[in-house]
Image (spheres, helix red, strand yellow):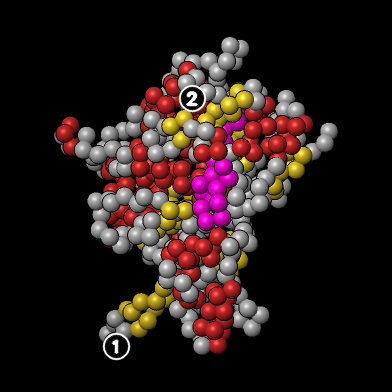
Amino acid sequence: MTQVAAQPTPLERFNGHAFRVLLDCLARPGKIGQLPSPPFSGAPSVSNSKEPNLAAVAACMSLLDQTVSFVQAVDADWMAADHPLTRWITLRTNARAVAPALADFALFHDPSCLALIGELKAGTLLEPEHSCTLFVCVPGIAVDADVTLRLTGPGIKDVAGVGLPGLTQPELVALAQRRPFPLGIDIFVIDQHARCLGLPRTTQIELVMN
Amino acid sequence: MSEKIDQLYNFALLDEDAKREIRRKLLKAVALPGHLVPFASRDLPIARGWGTGGLQITLAIITPDDTLKVIDQGDDESVNAVNLRRLIGRTTGVATTTDTASASLIQTRHRIPEEPLRADQILVLQVPMADPLRWVEPNLERATAMHSESDYGKMWVYMYESVVRAGDLRIASQYPVMVNRRYLMDTTPIPRWDVPKLHMAETLYLFGAGREKRIYAVPPYTLVEPLQFEDYPFRTEYQPDQRCARCGAEQVFLTTHFVPDASGGRWVSTCSDAAYCAKRLAEAEALL
Ligand SMILES: [Zn+2]
């Protein structure tokens, strides 16, 4: 068959591949997806002591453009609109940096920011899709050992178990807190190995006490 | 093909902004099973009525690694299916197939293939009419308000009055279902035979309605329950004595067509899923 279109650029290829991983993870909570390697580097630091999780930044950026807005947080605090990383993302996506309650997308650079999750928008009954999509960076996601979350709901055959080692009890409680459906925040948890866990608002999350 | 023509189109036709918008809406659709999510719905260089909603979803999610199957009325070789497959193939370079089991991405109208779909496959359905409440509430805004409250009393009454008491089967061919016990969803244009395939499935189903500008989804392992009554349970089109005249399959959805012969002709029923029928015939021949 004769082709009449260009092959995707590396960034387009990444965006397309990353989307399929995100879609699969959100459709199958508990399944751990592997995000592709970001086609760029050189993102500014999040703080003096912290480099960003580039896989999470790139996955979030793959969905950003001039029609949507975003907010970032680190160390349990919102980041300023003039933070170098915020400006770096804005420059590359044209997405607007806005206040947490308005943000279409949120990027939490560490799990302590989960304390802020209640400030994000959860949509309305008429427009439940006008809710925030949240990317949370965590140290690791464990599938076999040390289950900390038990998941049930659409996309899960019976019950799924995952572990989020390194998260404190209050962080896990904040993550597990869901709003009354159809309102809610849809979450992607992404670890340092670019592994991805989807937690759509339909997923009921039960904490497993060890 | 010249260099100039090579650069005529984006990969998968849509520009990145259009793809991104559809991708964002698809994620929300998956998080809200059965809920109609508005999207911008672009004009595409194909005729109306060709299912641009489904096509836009396919173009937004397809990657160079995909293997694509396109069916229309269950048939890979229908004019619409051939044209759409050529359009997607030429603007992406992806491999295409008629074999359901070999496809990673299946775009379809009217049918869900007979062969069970797997977790590593995605089915994209082209939808002509998205909102089941059009039967009782033609105003889209008021229908959206009813969906927001899960206010489906009118629909239940309408179903009972028209189907059970008046025997009107028009709605039975566009059977409404409750998804995840929250949103009422239309199953147009798939036959009732295919409705149970949506329930607790392995596969992700994505729906696109181009004219109504709506995207929606049924994730895997999601409850999809037909509206039904004790005195009128949900039933598929299945007839106990039905059989494909070509391959002999019994548990399939059949289409009936007129075959002329010397004595005038007769009506013959065969598998609607043409690729499935052909596969069964080939398997049977291999045994001889
Ligand atoms: Zn057959």
Residue A143 can be seen in this image: yes
**Chain identifier of the residue bearing label 2 in the image:** A
Left/right placement of residue A135 relative to residue B268 reads right
Q: Position of residue B170 (x, y in %)?
A: 45, 78
Determine whether A206 is above or below B230 in the image: above
Quadrant location of residue A91? top left
Is-magenta flag for residue A130? Answer: yes
Is residue A77 depicted above or below B230 in this figure? above
Front position among marks 1 and 2: 2
Q: How many marks?
A: 2
Q: Is residue A129 magenta?
A: yes
Residue kind at label 1, given as amino acid type: Ser
Write down the residue under mark 2: A81
What's drawn in magenta, residue-wise?
A121-137
Query: What is the distance, in whole Å, between disc 1 and disc 2 at their CAs?
Result: 81 Å
Residue beneath the point at 58% across and 67% down: B151
The extreme right residue here reads A210
Q: Position of residue B202 (x, y in %)?
A: 58, 52
Q: Which residue is mark 1?
A: B263
**Circle 2 sits in a helix, a strand or a loop, which is it?**
loop
SS state under label 1: loop
Say which chain tag 1 marks: B
- Give x and y (percent) for residue A46: 55, 18
